[in-house]
Image (tube, rainbow, N blue to C red):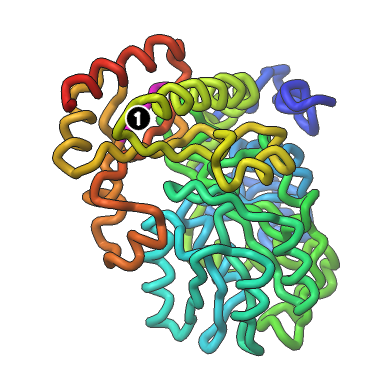
Amino acid sequence: MKFNTALLHKDYDGDPATGSTIVPIYQSSAFAQESAEKLEAVFNNKAPGYAYTRISNPTVSAFEKRIAALEKGIGAVACSSGMAAVTMSLLNILQSGDEIIAGAGLFGGTIDLFGDLEAFGITTRFTDEVTAESVKNLITDKTKAVFTELIGNPKLNVVDLQAVSDVCHSHGIPLIIDSTTATPYLIHPFDYGADIVVHSSSKYMNGGGNSISGIIIDSGKFKWDKNRYHGFDEYAKFGKFAYLAKLRNGIWRNTGACLAPMNAYLNSVGLETLGLRMERLCSNALKLAEFLKTVPGMEVNYPALADNPYYELVKKQFDGKGGAILTLRPGSKEKAFKLINNLKYAAIATNIGDVRTLVIHAASTIYTHSTDAQKLSAGVYDDTIRISIGIEDAEDLIEDFKQAIEKIQ
């Protein structure tokens, strides 16, 4: 099946009990069983079924199954937010004294999280660019994971997945990829050696800006050394499902980071148009970026532009599509604010992946807690405007930015 067909039909049959074409919202906290013996078996993962929505829910399970199939994974665990997914993906394998290698140009919230982990004895070693060489130089005997965004938000740097994963695996370290901004439409990271993929599914998978959620997908290919990774001894019997089994029965379950059934339903509805939306979003982003390149005094960053340093990697990994985010620098914070305020069609909001175009001044909002050095590493300057492209007609978007720019010149 090709992408859009797979969205609708791969490992998905709706609700066979009723014939509903989409699994309904099972808005229930608990699920009764016919006997104490059956509930015991379900509760202890010895029989199929549901006991309590914090542990599992039919609506959520359907969403997890669809994403796992879409990403070519063996299974997935849905979380209450994208940040919860990032946190759970790491804490499932880390303990005090461990180290993470990560890109310095991460989303501001992820950088803040890594700062929080220091209180628990987990250290992050940052590199300006996640490359095979930079990762190799930072690996120590304490390194337990390499984490990076596939397309940086908002730096828009692109990682060479195969090269980085080869280095990670040569040292027995898993590569965890945040593929939120790429989506499965542009790439399947497992085909390039990634071991775990996380998404803030609030973004492009949902598409409508109506629910917060995250998801973790396992490739099932990494060999978890129970002597190196704490707590895997009792889960070794699950073979390639060891990571997911440990996650479901441990930190994810115990912290209550579960996804609400309503949000899982809204994500499943939005997911079905992901391919159509991404095709339009990538096309709009390129057209707007090409226009902005012609405007004097404007500095534009978009990975699919021919003069972008990541252009060849974009062609190799993403078939030439650069995603749906670009950044614009008009020269000063004052000009950035004035440009933003003069746009007619773009909402001034912090989200990405909506059907409508969104703009934000990154330095004063999503990077407000970051140091100047962290902002610089993330490609965030005092005049940086992040643009999350929507599905409006490209001609209207271009005209809107044109009139807004004219008002600041």
Quarter placement of the N terminus: top right
* Closer-to-camera residue (237/218): 218
Which quadrant holds residue 210? Answer: top left
- Please tell me which residue is depicted at 37% across the width and 73% down the height of the picture: 116
Horizontal and vertical percent position of residue 121: 46, 85
Q: Which residue is mark 1?
A: 358
Q: Main secondary structure of the magenta part?
A: loop
Label 1 packing within 10 angstroms: few (<14), some (14-19), many (20+) = many
Does 5 sit left or right of 144 as displayed?
Answer: right
Horizontal and vertical percent position of residue 221: 82, 62
Residue 41 visible (yes or no): no
Residue 356 on the magenta span: yes
- Please tell me which residue is depicted at 76% across the width and 73% down the height of the picture: 235
Does 84 sit left or right of 151 as displayed?
Answer: left
Q: Is residue 344 above or below residue 43?
A: above
Region rendered in magenta = 355-359
The kind of secondary structure element at disc 1 is strand
**Amino acid type indicated by mark 1:** Leu
